């Protein structure tokens, strides 16, 4: 069972539950495990299967079924009105779990006729907070750095197979998900755009520069970035400027949900890993507690920069600096820890052997910080 399983079970007692997230992150497996292990009876429908599709539209489930799972339901054009009607007219003690790719999240955001009828959970890849049996935290760290956290390559641990899996997954995203979501004709240029993002992880991404390099318009590449974010392929971390007179609005940094997508040195891979784990944590806090969180970075006119800022309900909760091997405290982190006085200030060092504290700043290794 995954890290959000118990939360989903609790929410199913009250409302429908939607589960979204990247392609092949484990949503279907999660739903089937809940159905098989926690319910005495139920039914699983997958819109991609013709027989299931016909049964679903004919309402072929039993009144005594405890849980009904609708997988890939968003591919049905009228899915929101259909599930709304099913839920509103249901008088049986049946629970509904709806899973789907990032498109489920896209459709959820636009004109939500289902408001108040469901809870939404975002499923992320494996991380330090999920240690499979017989795998130590250090082994988890090694796999996250080499094959990424998506279930199939992570649990297998084979780097060659991970590369093959990643190529096949990427091809399906380009040929199916993106084509279904947006009428993008220049798929070959989009492929080049994604490659440029892969080589810029940890750096500021100036979209106009990339547009010039691949001979596309700035408006086009901006739209592409939005599409990739909505499909949970990448996420952008934007600059934090509130109440910082010397701060400047800078281009975003772009990170990949799959750590294996990064093209760069160990420092870039590690920064991407930290970014994904921070996002996973704040998404869980948002989905569970209902608070509004943001993941940002700081950069001012003097070039002082802090890699990540966690903002809760508009207030800075933590400053985080990321280093691969340098365990000396960043002077920029020290400067902003004094200036902003956040709840916490942390420097995460990949190779650190002995965590320590100095003033307001804690210096820790990733295993300690994101412990299982």
Image (cartoon, rainbow, N blue to C red):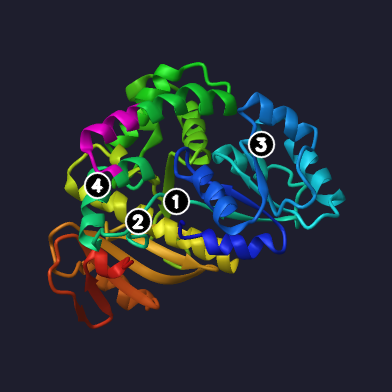
Residue positioned 23% across, 62% down in the render: 136
Please report contact status of discs 1 and 2: CB closer than 8 Å, yes or no: yes
Residue 81 disc label:
none
The CA span between labels 4 and 1 is 17 Å
Per the rendered image, the range of residues in magenta is 156-167
At numbered mark 2, what does the secondary structure look like: helix, strand or loop?
Answer: loop
The CA span between labels 2 and 4 is 14 Å
Q: Earlier in the sequence, mark 1 or mark 3?
A: 3
Front disc: 1 or 3: 3
Q: Earlier in the sequence, mark 4 or mark 3?
A: 3
Front disc: 4 or 1: 1
Percent across and percent down for residue 107 are 66, 40
Observer able to see residue 296: no
Crowd rating for badge 2 (residues with CA inside 10 Å; few <14, some 14–19, many 20+)? many
Residue that label 1 marks: 124
The CA span between labels 3 and 2 is 28 Å
């Amino acid at each position: 069972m995954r890290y959000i399983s118990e939360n989903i079970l609790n929410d199913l007692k009250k409302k429908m539950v939607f589960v979204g997230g990247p392609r092949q992150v484990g949503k279907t497996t999660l739903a089937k495990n809940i159905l098989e292990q926690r319910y005495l009876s139920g039914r699983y429908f997958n819109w991609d299967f013709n027989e299931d599709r016909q049964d679903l539209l004919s309402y072929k489930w039993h009144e005594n079924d405890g849980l009904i799972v609708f997988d890939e339901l968003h591919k049905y054009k009228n899915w929101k009105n259909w599930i709304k009607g099913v839920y509103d007219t249901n008088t049986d003690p049946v629970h509904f779990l709806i899973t789907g790719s990032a498109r489920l999240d896209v459709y959820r955001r636009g004109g939500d006729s289902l408001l108040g009828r469901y809870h939404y959970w975002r499923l992320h890849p494996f991380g330090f907070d999920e240690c499979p049996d017989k795998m130590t935290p250090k082994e988890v760290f090694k796999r996250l750095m080499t094959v990424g956290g998506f279930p199939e390559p992570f649990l297998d641990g084979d780097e060659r197979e991970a590369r093959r899996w990643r190529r096949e997954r990427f091809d399906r995203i380009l040929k199916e998900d993106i084509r279904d979501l947006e009428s993008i004709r220049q798929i070959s240029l989009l492929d080049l755009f994604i490659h440029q993002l892969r080589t810029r992880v940890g750096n500021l991404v100036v979209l106009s520069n990339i547009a010039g390099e691949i001979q596309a318009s700035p408006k086009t590449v901006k739209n592409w970035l939005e599409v990739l974010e909505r499909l949970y392929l990448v996420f952008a971390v934007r600059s934090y400027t509130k109440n910082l007179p010397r701060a400047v609005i800078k281009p975003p940094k772009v990170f990949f949900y799959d750590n294996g997508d990064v093209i760069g040195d160990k420092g870039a891979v590690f920064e991407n890993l930290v970014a994904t784990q921070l996002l996973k944590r704040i998404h869980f806090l948002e989905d569970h507690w209902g608070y509004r969180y943001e993941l940002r970075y700081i950069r001012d006119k003097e070039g002082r920069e802090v890699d990540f800022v966690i903002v809760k309900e508009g207030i800075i909760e933590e400053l985080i600096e990321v280093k691969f091997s340098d365990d000396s405290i960043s002077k920029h982190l020290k400067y902003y820890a004094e200036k902003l006085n956040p709840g916490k200030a942390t420097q995460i060092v990949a190779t650190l052997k002995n965590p320590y504290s100095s003033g307001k700043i804690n210096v820790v290794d990733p295993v300690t910080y994101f412990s299982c």
